[in-house]
Image: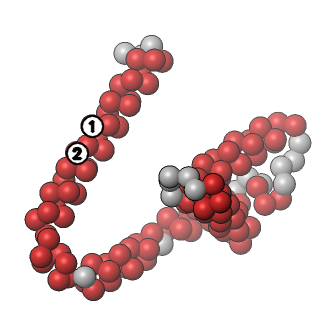
Amino acid sequence: MIQGFSVLLACQLAGEAAVRALALPLPGPVLGMALLFVALLARDRWSLWGRPPAFLREGAVEGAGRALLANLSLLFVPAGVGVIRNADVFSQHGVALAAALVVSTLLTLLVAVGAFRLVSRMMGDA
């Protein structure tokens, strides 16, 4: 499991370093997640020809991911503390924040549906 967490943290670190070094307009963890995706795809391809490196063996990253998901509720504690700590901001701008949340959620859903329909048409399933 330590190997799995090490791979996850290394991918996040590589993403952060690349974003800062290249001044890319996206969050480092997003690029790190893309790097992890590529590494897992390479692992699956590599296993066709031989054994992948030990840190990418089947189940290493998956076990760490399951452990994180099992304790996901603990990751919301800092966000909850931040909300309580900034309660005065929420009381002053609560309506604007709620409107921003609702509008951004609806836009995200609409974009996701549009992307799904576009890909579905491109694949010839519609």
Q: Residue at x 19, y 78 (%)?
A: 89
Amino acid at the residue labelled 2: Leu
Residue 63 visible to the viewer: no
Whole-percent x and y of residue 52?
83, 49
The residue under label 1 is 110
Image coordinates of residue 84 in percent, x first then y, are 25, 83
Decide: is 82 above or below 37.
below
Q: Secondary structure at mark 1?
A: helix
Camera-nearest residue between 52 and 112: 112
Which quadrant: the N terminus? bottom right
Classify mark 2: helix, strand or loop.
Answer: helix
Task: Tell me if label 2 and label 1 are in contact, CB under 8 Å.
Answer: yes
Coordinates of residue 81 in the picture (x, y in percent): 32, 83
> What residue is drawn where x is 45% and y is 13%?
124
1 sits to left or right of 110: right
- Judged from this view, the residue extending furthest toward the right is 50
From this view, report whether residue 78 is shown above or below residue 40: below
Q: Nearer the viewer, residue 62 or 93?
A: 93
Q: Residue at x 32, y 33 (%)?
A: 113
- Quick one: label 1, few (<14), some, or many (20+) residues within 10 Å? few
Q: Which mark is residue 36?
A: none
